[in-house]
Image (cartoon, helix red, strand yellow):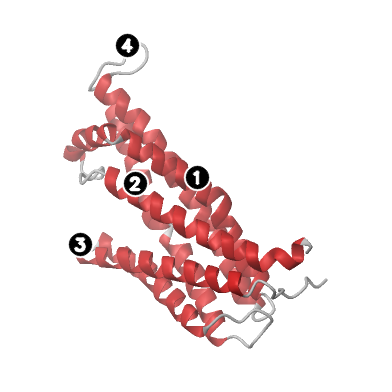
Amino acid sequence: MDLSQKTVRLAGMAMIVSAILTVVTVGLMAAGTSDKDPFTREDVPEFLTDVNDNEDLLVASGAVGIINDGVFVLAVGAALYILFRDRNPYLATIAGIAVAITAAISLVVDISNVLLTAIAKDYVEGGVGDIAAGDSAALELGRYVGIVTFAFTNLLFTPAGLAFTSIGLLITGAPQGLINPPKWLGWVAIVAGLAMWLSWLVVAVDAGFIFFPINLVATLVFLVGLGVWLLRNGDLQPAPMRA
């Protein structure tokens, strides 16, 4: 069996592994995230103290996230294009590119989280040279990196929502091709995509937080569901590339 015949199974495995790593990343992040807001100046000292106390969790979250976003999420994006380009090349292309953009933004968040732990440690315990604990420069730098991390975490939902909505519309409405998963998976993807876009409401109202667990659950159901379906239908082959 050559590589082209393994594409469907490899895609299914990448989706399932990505779902697992996403659960691990989100779980570690949730356990290590401070309830203080770096956007609020008065909260920054306690925010950095919380980050320092949860250093191991945040570093582990960042490390797992880098593996997931740098390898498996990109593989999922490529797989979505390869598997479904014969059904609707435009939606498949949008989904693939949107996943790649999501992975890039997620990598910024992963790296920022690891960097933030180092800055928090310098602020709480003192850094190299003459940097004393409670140093104002470390405090300001920690605030800046914390804001970047929080902002990019919200930003990634825009391209991710586009990716899931596009592939959902493709599965539910595009003409039949060589790879045709059940349409209910497409509807789950659409729910995930819409919930990701609606997650921006948290900026305006706290009630918008409800869309975070909705998009997470829908994302996991889609990735695992499609991954299992692809593994069970591993003898299928995607359409060949055309000049």
- In the rendered image, the quadrant that contains the N terminus is bottom right
Q: Nearer the viewer, residue 189 or 56?
A: 56
Q: Earlier in the sequence, mark 2 or mark 4?
A: 2
Select label 4 or label 1 by which is in front.
1
Q: Nearer the viewer, residue 18 or 94?
A: 18
Q: Which residue is mark 4?
A: 130
Residue type, numbered disc 4: Asp
Quote the CA–CA distance across marks 4 and 1.
32 Å
Quote the CA–CA distance across marks 1 and 2.
13 Å
Depicted 216 relative to depicted 26: above or below: below
Examine the rendering and report whether any part of residue 220 can be seen. Answer: yes
Examine the rendering and report whether any part of residue 135 can be seen. Answer: no
Quote the CA–CA distance across marks 3 and 4.
41 Å
Q: Quadrant of residue 49?
A: top left
Residue type, numbered disc 1: Ile
Q: Earlier in the sequence, mark 3 or mark 4?
A: 4
Q: Which residue is mark 1?
A: 66
